[in-house]
Image: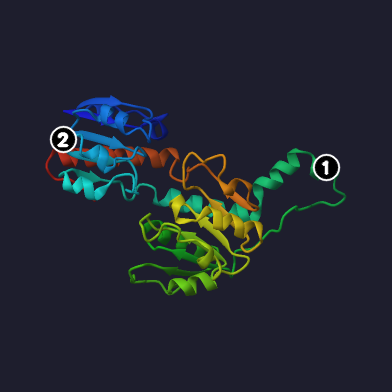
Amino acid sequence: MDIVLLDGYSLNADLTWSKLSNLGNCTFYDQTPVDDTEEIIKRIDNAEIVITHKTPLRNEVLKQVPNLKYIGIMGTGYDVVDIESAHQHDIIVTNVPTYGTDAVAQFTFSLLLEVTGQVGLHNQLIHEGKWSKVPDFTFWDKPLYELKGKTLGLIGYGRIAQKVAELGHAFSMNIIFYNHRPKEVNVPWIKQVPLDELLRQSDVISLHVIQTPDTINLINKETISKMKKNVIILNTARGKLINETDIAEALNNDRIYALATDVVSKEPISEDNPLLTAKNCYITPHIAWAPLETRERLLEITVNNLKSYLTGTPTNVI
């Protein structure tokens, strides 16, 4: 059985593919050009099984690979695959829904603590010699903020958001959330609210929804206009949830205080992305998912998904 892995490098620069290799005749590619449909089709060829991380599999690909029966997505988000087309071509698609909950929640708070505590900036200034030159025992070059008593608004309330809520509660924040479908809440310290109310109340807004036609550009001029002027926006979900032009303008005009994001609309980031020149904008290169332990877990579940498919009992099917 032929198995093709289209883009393994980012996951597996320091891990081993041996468990996957044991399941069939494997061909591994470090990267596959995401915009080259012909090359993607050529690499899949007659394989029955394809594993992808970020290489897109759209209808124009799926309709030309008739032997393909299974797509394993190495990740939680599944916007990389045209799910409707896959269903039409009787292709099973699986993902890995729970591997990164703790890591992404941890990173979400890393972004927030960087904005409010300015650790990186002051570490840099000290190494540049500034502390040695001040007359007092301390100095700070940007405002520092306590989280206690601030309102953390979560847009989306899946596993990661729930973990972020727990961390926010541990910091004595007030926690509210909006979810497109109402969710049962079993703790007294969190409140479910409509989206407009969340936008008005929140000192910090954290995005935890998948990318769909309804969530693309969720953060835009209109929604920004409903927020507090000093709001901090966090995004560890998908870059296209934010209209980058609108939020860059809001940052530069002091309409919002800060954006801290691990994702952008096009990755790697384009040199002309407006966020690169926006004030008080913190950008990391899509690494919330990348701790070693998290990637080990992701690889293990990816292999187990394939094993389940091969035994006729597929799991984590989209």
Q: Earlier in the sequence, mark 1 or mark 2?
A: 2
Q: How many marks?
A: 2
Position in image of residue 105 (x %, y %): 46, 53
Question: Separation of disc 1 and disc 2 at Cα?
Answer: 68 Å
Residue type at tag 2 = Pro
User: Which residue: 18% across, 43% down?
Assistant: 91
- Which of the colour schemes (rainbow, by chain, secondary structure, one colour) is used? rainbow
In the displayed structure image, the side of residue 283 where residue 98 appears, left or right:
left
Mark 1–mark 2 CB contact (< 8 Å): no
> Can you tell which mark lies on residue 189?
none
Q: Which residue is mark 2?
A: 66
User: Which residue: 44% across, 71% down?
Assistant: 195
Q: Is residue 259 above or below residue 229?
A: above
**Mark 2 crowdedness (10 Å alpha carbons): few <14, some 14-19, many ≥20:** some
Of the pair 17 and 212, the residue shown nearer to us:
212
Q: Which residue is mark 1?
A: 132
Position in image of residue 266 (x %, y %): 46, 44
Position in image of residue 117 (x %, y %): 65, 54
Residue type at tag 1 = Ser
User: Which residue: 45% across, 61% down?
Assistant: 218
